[in-house]
Image: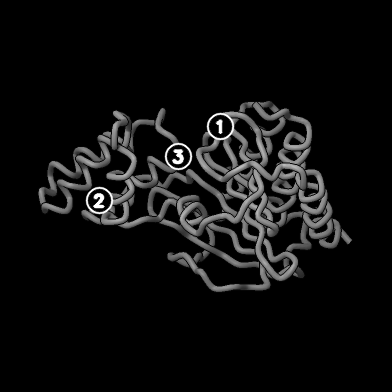
Amino acid sequence: MKRLYFILTFSILTATLVSCSDDKTNDTATTPTPVTDSIKTKVPDEFIDLLFADQSIQQLDNLASARTIGNKSIWTDFLSATQQALQHKNDEAIAAFRLIADDKTNEPRVRLWAWNGLRSLGVRPKKVEILGLILEVPQQGSTELLAMYADRSARYINYSGMVVVWEQHEHKMDSLMGASFKLADQIVATQALTNERSHARTDKVRFSFLTTDGLMQAEKSIEALNDPKDNFTRIFGNSVQVLSEMVNRAKTTPKE
């Protein structure tokens, strides 16, 4: 019964989100604002791919090049690092990526991208740190995605094309995501996981752990998410509550 509750809750919450957003036809999935917001559009594949932060050096170089135009930011440092790596100036590239990766004030995906660069140059972390956690849930013949990050931000993509952005700090949300990351630490430390990202459609719930040592994945059937003592089940249960908070906020937070 607990398993059915989890899955049905995802379905009910997302149906509510879709219905409450039908009048937001002018919204677009561009740069997220630092508030909880909902937007409805066709979500570009690039937007989804960037949530996983597993891009290669060349992809990072293209990304940094596009984002540094007229914008002095972390991407300027990234562009310097990727250019050095592509020119085989490995020592300089490692030093540049290391500065970005070790700066814990940087956004988690930025640090993950820096670690992608470091690993490509043969540098691996002494201690594995999980900076992101993504759940992909089969729904209505499509997939829903909830991405949570170590800074307690989150992104939710509904099967209908809805996107909800969470970039605030609140005790309940911070606690739920913090608990999920502690459970994720236990999973990564003790279980065999797939060390690459699958793009294949599946009828299982897919868990992606975004770590400084690379992306790791596991898939669990609906039937398997029925043990309240299992860490995957507990993460899934927490994610339902995170999603509930995001949906409720998206319904009540006024647009600027």
Residue type at the position of mark 3: Pro
Horizontally, residue 1 falls left or right of residue 75, namely right
Q: Calculate the distance from the C-alpha at mark 1 to the C-alpha at mark 2.
A: 34 Å
Residue 191, quarter of the rendered image: bottom right
Does the CB distance between marks 1 and 2 fall below 8 Å? no
Residue type at the position of mark 1: Thr
Please identify, in this view, whether the residue under mark 1 or under mark 3 is nearer the observer. 1
Q: For the residue carrying disc 3, how many other residues have a C-alpha within 10 Å: few (<14), some (14-19), or many (20+)? A: many
On the image, numbered disc 2 is attached to which residue? 123
Horizontally, residue 141 falls left or right of residue 74, namely right
Residue nearer the viewer, 28 or 55: 28
- Sequence-wise first label, 1 or 3: 1
Q: Quadrant of the C terminus?
A: top right
On the image, numbered disc 3 is attached to which residue? 108
Q: Calculate the distance from the C-alpha at mark 1 to the C-alpha at mark 3.
A: 17 Å
Please identify, in this view, whether the residue under mark 3 or under mark 2 is nearer the observer. 3
In percent of width and height, residue 67 lies at 34, 40
What is the secondary structure assignment of the residue under circle 2? Answer: loop
In percent of width and height, residue 233 lies at 71, 56
Extreme residue in the front direction: 26
Residue visible at 29% across and 28% down in the picture: 72
Q: Calculate the distance from the C-alpha at mark 3 to the C-alpha at mark 2.
A: 18 Å
On the image, numbered disc 1 is attached to which residue? 33
Relative to 93, does residue 104 appear above or below in the rendering? Answer: above
